[in-house]
Image (cartoon, rainbow, N blue to C red):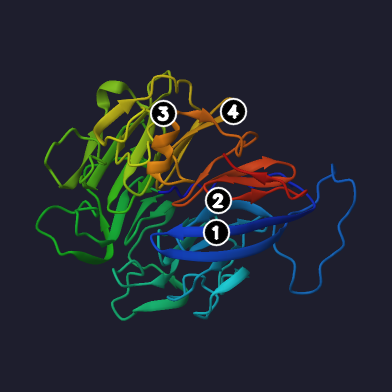
Amino acid sequence: MVGSRTGPVLAPLLCELPMFSRLFRFSSLIAIVAVTATIACSDGCDDEPEAPAAGERIPGVSYLQFGTYHLCTIDDDRKVWCTGQNHFGQLGDGTTHQQSELVEVAGLGEMAGLAVGHFDTTCAWNDDGELFCWGSNTHGVLADEDLTYSTTAVRIDGLPPVVDVDLGAFHACAVTAAGEVYCWGSNESGQIGAGEDIEEIIRAPRKVEGIDYAVRVGVGAEHSCALDQEGALYCWGSNQYGQVGLDLFGVLHVHHPDRVGEELGPVDDFDVAFQHTCATFGDSRQLHCWGRNQYGQFGLDDLDPRNKPAEVVEMIGVDEVATGEGQTCARIDNAVYCAGEVLRPVEEARETGEGYFFRKSAALEHAVELWGGILAICGPAHQHAIACRGVQAHDISGDIFED
């Protein structure tokens, strides 16, 4: 995915920012979400904005993440806010009503991190490592057999204190303060990493054996990856398109974690998308990608999947990588480069003759941080905007940033 990076609280970005007027697409679904965000005014603001009326003020953004049908953010007061569709209570506001503006998640205190599932579940954790989730429990992500869904946050029991969490389509994985990895939820493709002879749904956190001292976890639709403190990257789960990166032709499911790209050196950064994964390897921080490549998101001028890390030659010295369902972006120094034709059909992209390569992103030109999400890759662009590639983003003057 989509990534659950908490990131530092951002410096104040601007005064009054009309931030989102978004068209979310997934298959035949079209959901329109309109959000107005107010971000704290820094010393650089020329004019102090008028205070909005009671109930209208929306918090400054320190981290934002997209699902397919909803998005959530942590503000600079470390509160969690969500907006979008809400059929299973994934907004956490105590209702199942769709929201066109950000609403605060009920019952949470100050949160340290946030993970938004691909579809209908959301989680957040606090400084004590307590994990809370809400939304759909169809595949057991809420770790409670008695719930079908929850419109308010539910504490996940049976889990040691966590420092990182990510959600996929129907499963979750977490890294504990002790560096252990736990996963739970759907296990149809072995994405829980619990071995071959195990049930298809695991409704309680299960420790993943074979990984010591993990520091980060990333979850795709049906595959999972974890990075340890030595830079070793391990993946497991669905291998339909080679997304576990283990060069296993014809093997559809991998039930145990195995190291990816050991010969390429330690991994500095990685991100897991719906059905592909990208990482930077070695001292040169060379970008490699593997898995599904249906939109040319590997930047290799083709649409062919890869079942092991494929080198993207021109992407060297990468500081940060972020992925979406059909795109990949990499930040090198102060520039962001992206591949993947997410804004138009593949057939139309083929007709242009431009090829599928990494190009400098106009939308993310000034991004100092990248937030990967299933339908968009976003980041704080400059003092007037949070920009996105994959959906339209507007700065304070109303200009549109898009590639």
The answer to which quarter of the image holds residue 189 is: bottom left
Which dot marks residue 23? 1
Residue occupying image coordinates x 15% and y 64%: 199
Mark 1 and mark 2 residues within 8 Å of each other at the beta carbon = yes
Residue indicated by mark 2: 391
Which of the two labelled residues, at mark 1 and mark 2, occupies the earlier sequence position?
Answer: 1
For discs 4 and 3, the disc positioned in front in the rendered view: 3
Which amino acid lies under the numbered mark 4 shown in the image of this protein?
A: Ala
Q: Secondary structure at mark 3?
A: loop
Look at discs 3 and 1 and give the one toward the viewer.
Answer: 3
Cα–Cα gap, marks 1 and 2: 7 Å
Q: State the separation of the CA atoms marked 2 and 3.
A: 22 Å
Mark 2 is surrounded, within 10 Å at the Cα level, by few (under 14), some (14 to 19) or many (20 or more) other residues, namely: many
Badge 3 or badge 1: first in the primary sequence: 1
**Which residue is the site of mark 4?**
335
- Decide which of tag 4 and tag 3 comes sooner along the chain: 4
Q: CA distance from mark 2 to mark 4?
A: 19 Å
Residue 57 % position (x, y): 74, 66
Is disc 4 in contact with disc 3, using a CB cutoff of under 8 Å?
Answer: no
Which kind of residue does numbered mark 1 sit on? Leu
- Per the image, the residue denoted by label 3 is 355
Judge the density around disc 3: few (<14), some (14-19), many (≥20) Cα neighbours within 10 Å: some
Position of residue 97 in the picture relative to residue 21 (left or right): left
Q: Nearer the viewer, residue 371 or 114?
A: 371
Between the C-alphas of marks 3 and 1, the distance is 26 Å
**Furthest residue to the left?**
197
Side of 372 where 196 appears, left or right: left
Between the residue at mark 4 and the residue at mark 3, the CA separation in whole angstroms equals 21 Å
